Amino acid sequence: MKNIHTKQKETDRKEGMESNIEVWEDLVDIKELILALFICSITALGGYFIAPDNPTKKLLCGISGAIIGFVICAILIKPKRILIEGNKES
Amino acid sequence: MNITLIIHMIIAALVAAIIYTIIGAAPGADETATIAPITLVLVLSGLNGMVVLSFFISAIVACKLIDAVPVSIAGIPAGVMSTPMVEHAMVLKKHGLTDTSIRKIASGAIVGTLVSVPVSLLLAKAIVPFATVIKEYGDPVFFIGAIVLALLSKKRWVALASIIPFALLIQGLRHLYWGLGAVEKGTNVFISFFLGITIGPVILTLLELLDKEKRDGMQKFHRKTIYLKKDEEYIRVPNPFKILTKKELAYSTLASILGSVTFLLSPVGLTTFFGELFAGRVKEPVEKASLAVSCMEALAQATYMAGILIPLIALGIPLSPVALGPGNPLFNAPPVYTLENNMHHLLSNIDIVWATLIGAVIASAFTYFITVKYSQEICRFVFKRIPHEALLGVFFSLVLLLAFVDGGWINIAGVFLVGIVSGTFHRMGVNYGVLFMILYFAPWITSILAG
């Protein structure tokens, strides 16, 4: 595994494509991370504020907003993972 | 209990099983961060306690069970709990036994759940006589708990040194809010500080990104390469008990009992310790690895169940890492639950048992079936379709939302501050459990310090 990682890194460096950082054990692109935080925050707080004046409904609308934000982000942003599938064990 | 309530509980458990089968497969999905906020919202929305409990138990079981997939297929821990298993799962993968690895882990989880529920109920019964004493000294108990937890962690002196300053920060913010009139005097802001601690490391990293030097100095990566092996599909879903050898079944059962008894200790530490202890004596690598993964998973699952059930039934205060972490909203979610009036007080023991059984059985059946039959598809879907940014975004926004609900705009800044401080402590090696406990005894310790 280590060899593969070093090789991967070498090719990345050559192509000048290393731009992702590790946050919470997985890779993210800084700009896209900020975009995701922004989108989800807007949809969550937006949901909370436009909801009818009732604490429970407000909270449920807020959480629905957060989930809508999540779906938007999942559509807009590509995961930073390369999946290699094969029949042989690596 | 009537039919409508049972149907609601079943629906809640099914929804939790589906959601957490997906979230649980994502790399780095920490149980506290993923389960606590959602449970909290359900509690605050005024849902029946039994329905919330079935949801919670199902979420825990599903989240742990599905660990088998990313660990076995890609060698990636799906959460802190599954980190110790990766090494052994990789041995199996090297020998071309990915499918065996998934099955063994999933079966281990089932054994852990089945053993820990009755054992926890017995243990809770045994603790009840001491419960009033423990509860009477709640604050000192949490204080001693924090010290013990600090001493057990790797960076014990850092953890110990962090206790008083962090208590001051928490209580200082609460007094500030009272002074400014942002929060009614006497109301302890709790939930949003708790979430601030959970998301601390992420907030700290975000802050560092503002510093160009730090940003340029960060280790950069291109993509995470994940290897996925194509497996033959199963026609029938195998019986979990037939998957384990007699030895594995016996050791997993023993591990589950030990895990239930030691519910006060950190699950990750225990998993590593007992897993290595049991498997250490086996020489043959494949046999050793499959014994290790099944025992570790059984133990992890058992520690989780006992860690939530025993405090819930016997104490009513969250006195275990699990109850302090993901299970916190079941004990303390003002205004619905407080330490004096929470699920422990509102539900009878029979209620708790029923809700647990419904949650555990539905999640075990659903997630076990899915895990064994569709592991490839789940991995492919999660790795290809769920960006990590979206996961971070949704948790961040939930913290923001609940911070605002708790104390208005100023509390968003307060939670940010709590996040920065706890993130720094966490990076220095302070256990989350220590920080969570401080939230509880901060008023007590500060009043003692003030004389």
Image: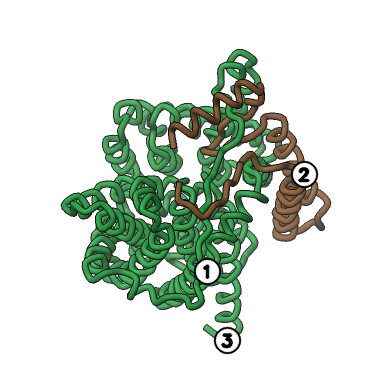
Chain colours: A brown, B green
What is the CA distance from the residue labelled 3 to the residue labelled 1? 38 Å
- The residue tagged 1 is B233
The subunit carrying tag 1 is B
Mark 3 and mark 2: span between their CA atoms? 43 Å
The amino acid beneath tag 2 is Leu
* Front one among B86 and B399: B86
Foreground residue among B40 and B118: B118
Q: Secondary structure at mark 3?
A: helix
Q: Are marks 3 and 1 on the same chain?
A: yes
Label 2 sits on a secondary structure element that is helix
Q: Label 1 is placed on what type of residue?
A: Glu
Q: Is residue A85 left or right of residue B149?
A: right
Q: Nearer the viewer, mark 2 or mark 1?
A: 1
Front residue of this view, candidates B160 and A44: A44
Q: Residue drawn 51% across and 66% down?
A: B232
* Local SS, label 1: loop
Residue in the image at 45% along x and 51% along y: A89
Closer to the chain start, of discs 3 and 1, is: 3
Front position in the image: B92 or B193: B92
Pointer 1 local density, CA inside 10 Å: few below 14, some 14–19, many at least 20: few
The image shows residue B54, relative to residue A50, as above or below, that is: below
| Residue placed under numbered mark 3 in the picture | B3
Image coordinates for residue B86, horizontal then vertical, percent: 39, 47
Say which quarter of the image contains residue A79.
top right
Label 3 or label 1, whichever lies nearer to me, is 1
| Picture coordinates of residue B85, whole percent (x, y) | 36, 50
A32 to the left or right of B269: right
Question: Chain letter of disc 2?
Answer: A
Report the disc number at residue B360: none
